[in-house]
Image: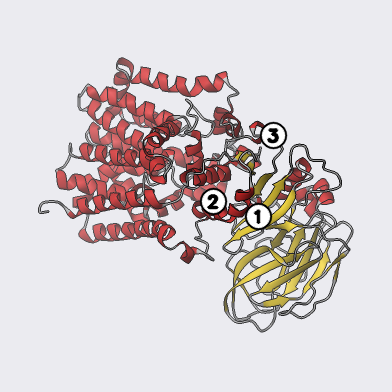
Amino acid sequence: MRGVPASAWLVLGLQGFKLWLAAQLPLFGDEAFYWLESSRPALVHDDIPGLLPALIAVARALLGDAALAVRLPTLLASWLTLLLLYRSARAWTDARGAWNVLLLASLPPLLGLNGVLALPDALVNLAVVLCLAAAQQVLQGRDAGRWWLALGLVVGLLAHYRFALHLGAAALAVAALPGLRPLLRAAVLGPVLPGLALALAVLVLPSLLGDGHGLRFQFLERHPFRFQPRLLADPLLQAVLVSPLLWALSLWAGWRCLRARPGLAVWAGWGLAFVALLALLGPFADAERSRLHWPAPAHLALVLPLAGLWPALPRWLRGLTLGLAACVLALGCGYLAAIVLRPAALESSGLYPDRFLGARRLLHALEPELRRLSPDAPLVVDHALLGAQLEHELAQAGRHRPVWVLDHPHNRRHGRGAEPGRLHRALEDGPRGSAEGLLVVEPAALSLRERPRWLLELCRRWPAARWLREVGFDHLRKRYVLYRLPRADVDVGSRSCQPPVLGYVDLLAEARVQPGQVVTGWVQAAAPGLAGLRLRLADRELPLEGPLAMPSLATTFGEDVLAAMPAVGWRARLPEALPRGRAWLHLEARTVDRDWHPVAALPVRVEARHGGPDARRTRRGLAGGGDQGRAMPASRSSRHRAISGSPTSAVGSSLSTPSNRLMPRPSHLKLPAQSSGDSAST
């Protein structure tokens, strides 16, 4: 159509792509948990306030449990955000300029794909733009703006507890810019103050009447409140996600427009105040969870000043900015499209989308066990995110079945410790019939430091739980252990539950290794221990030396854990003749009731040898090649591939790697009666 700018077609095309993605992408953990919360809406939940689950409940009533239904509220919120930006921009420019505003606002991937995932961020972005557009109207003398401002505050506070930071940035902007002082009078005289009080009452009163866990977690427990120097780099990482040049120009435009007309200065002032507040508080705040998406609303605020100065920029600078930002957006869109169209192409890479695809593949693998489960038999998983994903996959297939959840450290770490009980998904509230149940354990949901104690606790709770099999995908990037739970009236007798073997390889994923280099690690298994252990690189078995005593592992795991699950170290020297290129390193174990099975795997890159035989180590803080090593348990955020394996039930005192059809017979390794290992802290 003539007269429609190219920017309009690009923005509208992106919205169509978002709609397709929202319908095709499987739900990942947080989305699935919000879906589960929507089955029992409340004013507040421990992890988020009640607005998003309530909106999802409405969408489910209309469209069912499809992924698009779950994401419809956030999709609509993202489109309303763009509409408000367009209407606000029309106060300063023509239709072509307003479409340019939307294009600049859509270039960062977190904003271009805003609303594709059912996350509270889309509602927070809508609330920010609604508040700023309303403040612009108030400063232009329109009384209706006060009502819209009150609505924006209510939406923001009911969308996420994090909106408190946005209110703090607003206070900073009003205090620093005299031209924004009329907003204070509008807040006192109009509906803004009552709306703010109502939203705060909705958030605070249920927590005060209950145990207050949600507020404690969000504002106290999750934050260390100590200076963390490494977090000073966060603004640089956030700039990369936006596109560095576009982010720099946005900040520059905001600074230039601070003294512009108040209607435009409110956008610039709030955006800069929010960036400054995050920079000041960020090094003292929660660092365990990703915060790279936090500054996204600031770009939405600064895009209006940037669009006003955009025509004055040199053409080459505009072209370079758009080109770089478009490349960043294309990478984000291409990755999500690959998850839908070619998920197999992402396997064996660091980009494998296990948070999207793990539950669906797990459910497919569980089909034989699920067919044998009676309707009243419990299906149990260890942590809440996996339980929500499995339950959504079952509901989407029309096979509604509750998935019960244990009191897992992962739940408490993400502020959801009490939510399974409130949602009637805690196992304590589950069925207590005489049918056998199924337990699914994901050891990697915890850091390697935490896994042994948790796995031992499971076996203490169900001493008669019987190991069934393991399910692993993509070279053990996702691994699950399946147990058959005994009937409630079963006599435990002499049977005992065996936790999986834990394996550790002292290399980073994609580490560069050389022929002759020494590789170390350890394994941890419950008594009576392993029958055999071997290390394979591609199709070659590497001779192992060991067991190596690693006494400082007791500091990491505790003496009581090591008494129940002894750990032994090992080391191997890579052969002098190795083909160059990428290969997989597999650590495998053998037990009495199972043949060889993998317990750890990671990709490495073999390079030509240079330097001595114990050349460059690939991990900081490790002893050199001839040492026993300081095998460090990795956190979930690291790139290690230390994965739990099968249960151990071997009898005997030797750790051996007997011959098979492919490998020669290496020497036997004598197991100590009780061994420990060496580990630095994560």
Could you say whether the residue bearing mark 1 is in a helix, strand or loop?
Answer: loop
According to the picture, the residue beneath numbered tag 3 turns out to be 432
Amino acid type at circle 1 is Ala
x%, y% of residue 217?
Answer: 57, 32
Q: Nearer the viewer, mark 1 or mark 3?
A: 3
Sequence order check, earlier mark of 1 and 3: 3
Q: CA distance from mark 2 to mark 1?
A: 23 Å
Q: Nearer the viewer, mark 3 or mark 2?
A: 3
**Is 223 positioned to the left or the right of 309 in the image?**
right
Amino acid type at circle 2 is Ala
Give whichever of 63, 589 is nearer the camera: 63
Quick check: 336 above or below 261? below
x%, y% of residue 264?
Answer: 24, 36
Give whichever of 443, 423 is nearer the camera: 423
According to the picture, the residue beneath numbered tag 1 turns out to be 634
Give whichever of 60, 37 is nearer the camera: 60
The structure residue drawn at horizontal position 31% and vertical position 47%, both measured from the top left corner, is 250
Contact flag, marks 2 and 1 (Cβ < 8 Å): no
The structure residue drawn at horizontal position 65% and vertical position 70%, both measured from the top left corner, is 585
Q: Residues within 10 Å of mark 1 (few under 14, many from 20)?
A: many
According to the picture, the residue beneath numbered tag 2 turns out to be 359
Q: CA distance from mark 3 to mark 2?
A: 26 Å
Q: CA distance from mark 1 to mark 3?
A: 37 Å
Amino acid type at circle 3 is Arg
The structure residue drawn at horizontal position 70% and vertical position 43%, both measured from the top left corner, is 436
**Is 226 positioned to the left or the right of 7 in the image?**
right
Could you say whether the residue bearing mark 2 is in a helix, strand or loop?
Answer: helix
